[in-house]
Image (cartoon, rainbow, N blue to C red):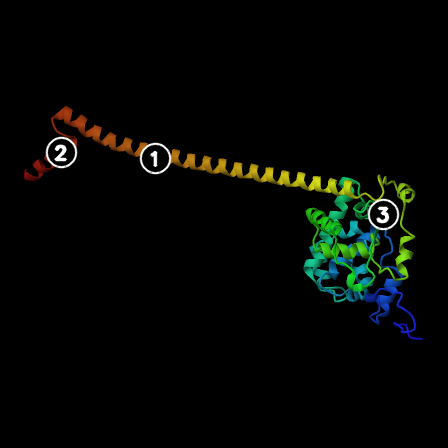
């Protein structure tokens, strides 16, 4: 029996998976939209989405194991320690996507993830789930054409990750990440997976077991406001630093200008002193002998020549 769509029965999968690519079908049936709670798995999707930007997801899936080998099994800590030598090596690796900008972005994003954990005690999985209040957002599309490509939440996430120094994390890429990791259930309503993935969403007790207090379930506004406040504080700090730097530069310019003017003034005074000295010397000679010293010497020389 053919594995593709059949006129005998309505399709039970999302339209995008029925492309005839077995990898796509397998990915749809076993992984896409399945809630992710592991930080490493969440980082894996983030890294792969980074490389997928502008390319087909099928290509990334085919090279997934090569990416796993190249980026230390998607261990964010190890990826964050990669060096320029690693960038050069991976840029020549035909098994992955040889895009130096994306390779650098993957490493930079890993460093942002590590800072998030170290500075805020916030794991990547918790980070994404907090945006939706730990409750899976539900899509309502009945056909592929009705499925949206971004949301207000994905736009907020994109802004916040960019603030943290991440790259290739636009609103569309972040929405694709939310779909893939089950933060939003975007299987079409008629897909058999639509109901399945919703059954495995964590509740308050599951999060409590990993030490996370979810607060009010379904309310991601508090976290969004917290991130927005952090962004405002950071913007204010940058503005103050810029202002302080500008003030310092102006003071240095003023000091340099004053120093230069002082030196020029001293030079003028010194020059005037020499001229005055010569003038005074002539005047003093004239007072002693009735005529300036220079004129007296000239008269004596002429008298000697005549003799």
N-terminal of the pair, mark 2 or mark 1, is 1
N-terminal of the pair, mark 2 or mark 3, is 3
- Mark 1, Cα crowd under 10 Å, few <14 / some 14-19 / many 20+, is few
Q: Which residue is mark 1?
A: 267
Choose mark 2 or mark 3, whichever is in front.
Answer: 3
The residue drawn where x is 53% and y is 39% is: 246
- Are the two marked residues, 3 and 1, in contact with CB atoms closer than 8 angstroms? no
Q: Which residue is mark 3?
A: 135
User: Callout 2: helix, strand or loop?
Assistant: helix
> Which x, y percent locates residue 70?
78, 59
Q: As rendered, which of 304 and 84 lies closer to the eye?
A: 84
User: Callout 3: helix, strand or loop?
Assistant: loop
- Name which quarter of the figure residue 291 lies in: top left
Res. 81 in view: no
Labelled disc at residue 295: 2
Q: CA distance from mark 2 to mark 3?
A: 108 Å
The extreme bottom residue here reads 1
Q: As rendered, which of 16 and 287 lies closer to the eye?
A: 16
> Which x, y percent locates residue 206?
91, 44
């Amino acid at each position: 029996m053919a594995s593709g769509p059949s006129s005998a029965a309505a399709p039970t999968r999302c339209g995008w998976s029925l492309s005839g690519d077995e990898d796509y079908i397998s990915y749809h049936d076993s992984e896409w939209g399945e809630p992710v709670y592991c930080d490493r798995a969440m980082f894996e999707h983030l890294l792969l989405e980074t490389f997928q930007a502008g390319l087909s997801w099928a290509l990334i899936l085919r090279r997934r194991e090569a990416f796993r080998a190249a980026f230390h099994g998607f261990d964010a800590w190890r990826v964050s320690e990669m060096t320029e030598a690693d960038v050069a090596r991976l840029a020549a690796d035909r098994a992955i996507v040889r895009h130096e900008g994306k390779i650098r972005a993957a490493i930079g994003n890993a460093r942002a993830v590590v800072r998030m954990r170290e500075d805020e005690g916030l794991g990547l999985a918790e980070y994404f789930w907090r945006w939706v209040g730990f409750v899976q957002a539900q899509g309502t599309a009945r056909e592929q054409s009705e499925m949206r490509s971004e949301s207000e939440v994905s736009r907020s996430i994109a802004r916040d990750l960019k603030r943290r120094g991440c790259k290739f994390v636009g609103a569309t890429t972040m929405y694709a990440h939310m779909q893939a990791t089950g933060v939003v259930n975007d299987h079409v309503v008629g897909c058999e997976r639509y109901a399945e993935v919703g059954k495995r969403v964590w509740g308050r007790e599951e999060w409590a077991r990993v030490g996370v207090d979810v607060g009010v379930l379904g309310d991601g506004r508090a976290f969004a406001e917290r991130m927005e406040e952090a962004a405002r504080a950071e913007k204010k700090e940058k503005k103050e630093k810029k202002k302080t730097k500008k003030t310092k530069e102006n003071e240095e310019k003023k000091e340099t200008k004053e120093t230069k003017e002082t030196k020029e003034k001293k030079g003028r005074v010194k020059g005037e002193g020499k001229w005055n000295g010569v003038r005074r010397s002539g005047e003093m000679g004239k007072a002693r002998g009735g005529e300036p010293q220079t004129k007296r010497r000239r008269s004596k020389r002429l008298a000697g020549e005549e003799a």
